[in-house]
Image (cartoon, helix red, strand yellow):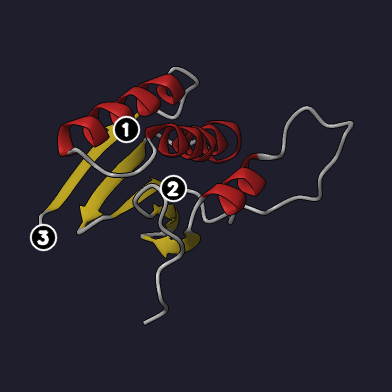
Amino acid sequence: MSSFTASIDLPPRASSVPLARRLVRDVLRTWRAPQDPEDAELLVTELVANVVDHAGGDVLTLELSLAGAWLRVGVLDGSAVVPVIREMSHTEERGRGMQLVAAVADRWGCEEHRGGKRVWFELSPAGVGEPAEP
């Protein structure tokens, strides 16, 4: 099975959100990845927007890897503040991003990375469920 990886640094500003979406869409198409590109775009939008809104810093890094049929997307930033899944609120306009990630991704997580963090998600091929635990 083929494996592919890609990584790009982006400025942590609002204009990076649609750019990250386009990058994910283009990379998945180039790799002929079997994942639903709309799911991947939605989730990367949430992760990059979280960095823009909450982490700041000088740079964020978007990482993509396709190993076999599984896609893993990570967003790295310099903040050690871990994202939180908030309670659903009908009065708040924002704050549902990590709920979307948890609901749509097959797996997701957050790990320390060089004084900051990597928030990642994995998507199975369209129509396949969660991977077996190792």
Q: Position of residue 35 (x, y in %)?
A: 34, 44
Please give the residue where the numbered disc 1 appears in the rendered image.
24
Q: What is the x, y in percent for residue 87?
A: 81, 50
Q: Residue at x 20, y 59 (%)?
A: 68
Q: Residue furthest left?
A: 2
Q: Residue at x 59, y 53 (%)?
A: 102
Which residue appears at 42% of the width and 51% of the height?
Answer: 127
Amino acid type at circle 1 is Val
Say which label, 1 or 2, has the lower sequence index.
1
Q: Residue furthest bottom?
A: 134
Q: Can you tell which of label 1 and label 2 is closer to the viewer? A: 1
Q: Earlier in the sequence, mark 3 or mark 2?
A: 3
The reply to whether callout 3 and callout 2 are in contact (CB within 8 Å) is: no
Determine which residue is flagged by label 2: 78
- CA gap between label 3 and label 1 equals 21 Å
Residue 2, percent across and down?
10, 55
Q: Give the CA separation, mark 3 to mark 2.
A: 33 Å
Task: Give the mark nearer the N terminus: 3 vs 1.
Answer: 3
Seen from the viewer's position, the closer of residues 116 and 120 is 120
State left or right for residue 6 relative to residue 122.
left
Q: Quadrant of the C terminus?
A: bottom left
Which residue corresponds to mark 3? 1
Does 89 appear above or below 66? above
Residue type beneath disc 2: Gly
Left or right for 69, reference 11: left
Q: Are marks 3 and 1 in contact (CB under 8 Å)?
A: no
